Image (cartoon, rainbow, N blue to C red):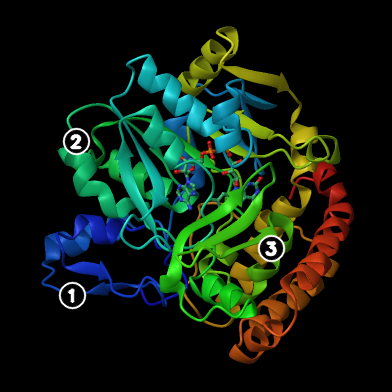
Amino acid sequence: MRSHLCNRCGSCVGLSGGSVQFVEKTGAYRPTVTGPIDDALAGLLWKACPGKSFDFVENRKRIYPETPNFHTFTGPYFRIGIGHATDGGIRKAGASGGVISAVLIWLLEKKMIEGAVVLGMSADEPWLTQAFIATSREQILEAAQSKYIISSVNEILPAMEAFRGRLAYVGLPGQIQSVRLLQAMNHPSVKNIRYIFGPFYGNTLHFSSITSFLRTYGEKDYRNISRLYFRYGEWPGNMRVEFSSGRVITLKKFHANYLIPFHILRNSLYCTDLTNEFTDISGGDAWAPVYEERGKGFSMIISRSAQGESILQQMISEGALRFSQIDEQEAISMHSHGYDFKKRGGFIRIKFRKMLGKSVPDYGYRPAGFAFSRYLMEIVISSLFILMGTRFARWLVELFPPALIGGIFERTRTIWKKSTYSVKRKKP
Ligand SMILES: Cc1cc2nc3c(=O)[nH]c(=O)nc-3n(C[C@H](O)[C@H](O)[C@H](O)COP(=O)(O)OP(=O)(O)OC[C@H]3O[C@@H](n4cnc5c(N)ncnc54)[C@H](O)[C@@H]3O)c2cc1C
């Protein structure tokens, strides 16, 4: 709980019956012990925590025995493709192609589930996120789009246990890993889950990213926020903040990426799962100029389990989803910078952390054979993360217009993508 290995999945809070809580969600957002914990509860929380360990190899064998394809970068899969929801309203509401929301709505309308665990924004505190069980198309669409601040979906495990009906569950890799651990224990909190879906995951940010962003525009109090969006408007969308005063601030998503090195949750640096490898279906952005130029919204879709593949097939044949299959190499090159960050950088950072005598996560596998130059590059990247995470650097960046800093970051991303393009030809 006190190390950088906590990904804030929220399971310890959800399972603790009130004895563990997130006390400052606008601050460090750490789970804090606030009540009694006996040995049995401590044992359960430890076993359900994916931060310290999650065996990718064992869990893949257990969960995907019938899945024909696998690559260390993509995880197990039946098919990978580019697509989007054919319903224009769903596509527009989604972060990318609206695929995750379309799948949830399809399952609900086919009566294959009665509810979907999703992440919306809080009604009482609209600057914070709030997980809930959506039981209608409108509620699923209300919760569409990515939220880039720390969000602890598994806090609602008790509500999932009490729910009368079958559930689909949407979460980030750490949250899903914990659900998978609980499923292996036959824990009642996850008994209603029939399907698991999830977005790709580069990183997530502390709430300080919002307060810092506001300060650059002269807004001092986040409590004046009436609506907060991270992917508003046409894909790839904009960060958009609406205030009770009527003021609206927007910044291109690619420009808002400048907040990442200043406010990244340190655990993101030790998470090595980009494509959400333990879902039935995962969805990411279709990052390639050919799609980015067209706007409108395109997702990369990965079907992983037999039931995920069956949903995909039915939705395509019924016209609910548009899908063009691509091969593994093309898929990897579209996210080459992301794989470099997670599957090379992530493991090197874990190695550095171990050398400093700190606890490290055990993922059951360790890619080896990175070039010496990649280690050097990681020293530069990690040093930048440390420097840019200081108070001074955060204060300094607030003096510049976000569009200017954002433009520099957008160009850096393009260069990084080009320089990592060869990642697809090498296995780690
Ligand atoms: C923190 C974060 C980091 C991401 N990083 C990358 C990346 O590096 N590369 C990439 O290609 N894609 C990334 N994505 C995924 C991308 O932004 C889209 O979510 C994905 O393409 C699915 O789009 P969609 O239109 O199908 O989803 P939608 O139809 O918009 O549905 C998204 C679903 O995800 C849920 N959700 C949103 N945010 C969260 C959250 N923080 N925690 C749990 N559930 C959530 C919503 O409730 C909704 O059900 C990231 C997403 C998030 C949330």
Mark 2 / mark 3, whichever is N-terminal: 2
Q: CA distance from mark 2 to mark 3?
A: 37 Å
In front here: 280 or 90? 90
Seen in the picture, residue 139 relative to 123 is either above or below; the reply is above
Looking at the image, which residue is at 64% across and 88% down?
A: 395
Q: CA distance from mark 1 to mark 3?
A: 35 Å
Figure disc tally: 3
Side (left or right) of 406 relative to 13: right
Residue found at the very far front of the displayed protein = 246
Which amino acid lies under the numbered mark 3 shown in the image of this protein? Asn
Helix, strand, or loop for circle 1? loop
Crowding at dot 3, Cα within 10 Å, few <14 / some 14-19 / many 20+, comes out as some
Crowding at dot 1, Cα within 10 Å, few <14 / some 14-19 / many 20+, comes out as few
Q: Using the image, tell me which numbered label, if any, was put on residue 163.
A: 2
Seen in the picture, residue 337 relative to 103 is either above or below; the reply is below
Mark 1 / mark 2, whichever is N-terminal: 1
For label 1, being within 8 Å of ligand 1 is answered no
Helix, strand, or loop for circle 3? helix
Which amino acid lies under the numbered mark 2 shown in the image of this protein? Phe
Q: Using the image, tell me which numbered label, if any, was put on residue 222.
A: none
Looking at the image, which residue is at 48% across and 71% down?
A: 207
Looking at the image, which residue is at 30% across and 56% down?
A: 11
Q: Using the image, tell me which numbered label, if any, was put on residue 34.
A: 1
* Residue marked by disc 3: 257
Residue found at the very far bottom of the displayed protein = 392
Residue found at the very far top of the displayed protein = 317
Q: CA distance from mark 1 to mark 2?
A: 26 Å
